[in-house]
Amino acid sequence: MKRLNRAGEAVKTFVELRQNGGCHVPGVWFFDGGKLVASAARLGPARMVAPGTVAVSASGRQWMAVGGDRVNGAAGWTFVSPYVEHEPVKGDAVRFNDNPKSLKIRAKLDAYLHYFQDVKGSLPESVALRREQLSACGAMPGQLYKGVRLEAYV
């Protein structure tokens, strides 16, 4: 069996302790980085948490809050692997990979941003890319590129 990430290990320990003590096990725990910040009966709307918050269910499934900002909350949830450590995304600048596919996507993104700025006079607030494009670039939803938030097209 694969080793769980820090949030998964913490929830596994919480569930074991509560079950051995005969206590009620809440449905979901919320982590900001490696720190437990809350628990709830269900996942709920993403706007209630900051982007980058990881939610872990008692069964071990994990979601990361993406998009939005720290003031207005996240825009949505994306399912993530419980076996990979997920660093919090706080609107930090994206660092693209240097592979040929990433460079091609970046060139098309630059062309789109240039076109948008020429037509509208300003940059868009966000740009939606397919998940495979984001992963090829080494980017996470919610990160910034030239002041534009990258979002995952659902």
Image: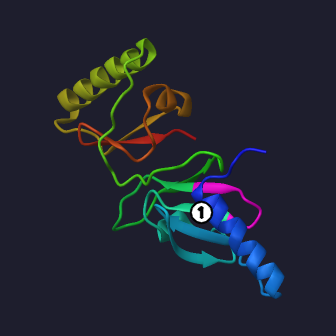
Question: Residue 32: x, y in percent?
Answer: 47, 65
Question: Residue 8: x, y in percent?
Answer: 65, 59
Quarter of image, res 61:
bottom right
Q: Is residue 46 above or below residue 85?
A: below
User: Which residue is located at x 45 percent, y 56 percent?
Assistant: 52
User: Which residue is located at x 36 percent, y 44 percent?
Assistant: 143
Q: According to the image, what is the colour scheme of the structure?
A: rainbow
Q: Does the magenta stretch include residue 23?
A: no
Q: Nearer the viewer, residue 9 or 74?
A: 9
Quarter of the rendering occupied by the C terminus: top right
Q: Is residue 136 above or below residue 75?
A: above
Give the residues drawn in magenta, as a range: 57-63
User: Is any atom of residue 138 visible in this view?
Assistant: yes
Q: Nearer the viewer, residue 147 or 20?
A: 20
- According to the picture, the residue beneath numbered tag 1 turns out to be 55
User: Horizontally, is 63 left or right of 129 in the view?
Assistant: right
Looking at the rendered structure, the number of numbered marks drawn on it comes to: 1
Q: What residue type is labelled 1?
A: Ala
SS for callout 1: strand
Quarter of the rendering occupied by the N terminus: top right
Count residues near mark 1 (Cα–Cα under 10 Å), then give few for <14, some for 14-19, many for 20+: many
User: Which residue is located at x 31 percent, y 47 percent?
Assistant: 92
User: Which residue is located at x 25 percent, y 24 percent?
Assistant: 115
Q: In this view, does 87 lie above or below 124?
A: below
Q: Nearer the viewer, residue 7 or 92?
A: 7
Question: Residue 145: x, y in percent?
Answer: 29, 37
Question: Residue 28: x, y in percent?
Answer: 66, 70
Quarter of image, res 150:
top left
Q: Nearer the viewer, residue 12 or 121?
A: 12
